[in-house]
Amino acid sequence: MHLPISDEAKNFMTYDYAELKDLCKQFLTLVSGILVFSITFTDKIVEFNGLPRWPLLISWIAFIGAIVLCGLGLGLIALAGGQAVSGGQSYRIMEYRAVWLTFGAGLSFLIGLAALIVAGVLKMFIDLPLRPGT
């Protein structure tokens, strides 16, 4: 038995669902890669006995937050897809929440990226000799 799917639900599944799902998957790959990269090369970015460690820790927390928010958005858009094909009407509300979770993940990623750049810049300027020849 095949349930009829409305044209609006078909458009949702074709465009909104597919695009947000792909965006979330690619974004999760990017953020987790940057997180692993920054953890791997921590000793090159900062020394953990000085000032630059705080921006680095903030960036890690923000990256983890971005991963969690995007994962929640991906799960919610998957639930919305299930609602859309089964004839449920609440898929638009789920889609709206998934989009906002994904925006939150993007904002968290930008905060993490900015904090990572601050940590690198602080490391660069703190390691500069104060006088020529020292």
Image (tube, rainbow, N blue to C red):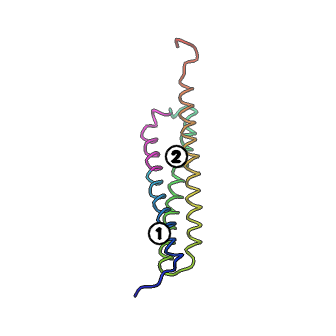
Compared with 49, 33 (above or below) is below
Could you say where residue 27 lies in the image, as x and y percent from the top left?
A: 48, 53
Quadrant assignment, res 102: bottom right
Q: Which mark is residue 67?
A: none
In the displayed image of the protein, which residue is found farthest to the top? Answer: 133
Q: Which residues are magenta?
A: 30-45
In percent of the image, x 43 and y 52: which residue is there? Answer: 29
- Choose between 126 and 33: the one closer to the eye: 33
In the rendered structure, which disc, 1 or 2, sits on the residue that comes first in sequence? 1
Instruction: Point out the image quarter for the N terminus.
Output: bottom left
Could you say where residue 16 lies in the image, as x and y percent from the top left?
A: 52, 66
Whole-number angstrom distance, CA of label 1 to CA of label 2: 35 Å
SS at mark 2 in the image: helix
SS at mark 1 in the image: helix
The kind of residue tagged 1 is Thr
Image depth: mark 1 or mark 2 in front: 1
Could you say where residue 92 lies in the image, as x and y percent from the top left?
A: 58, 72
In percent of the image, x 46 and y 65: which residue is there? Answer: 18
Could you say where residue 38 lies in the image, as x and y percent from the top left?
A: 46, 41
Q: Would you name the residue on which mark 1 appears?
A: 14
The kind of residue tagged 2 is Trp
In the displayed image of the protein, which residue is found farthest to the bottom? Answer: 1
In percent of the image, x 49 and y 34: which residue is there? Answer: 45
Q: Would you name the residue on which mark 2 appears?
A: 60
Crowding at mark 1 (Cα within 10 Å: few <14, some 14-19, many 20+): few
In percent of the image, x 59 and y 61: which residue is there? Answer: 100
Compared with 87, 68 (above or below) is above
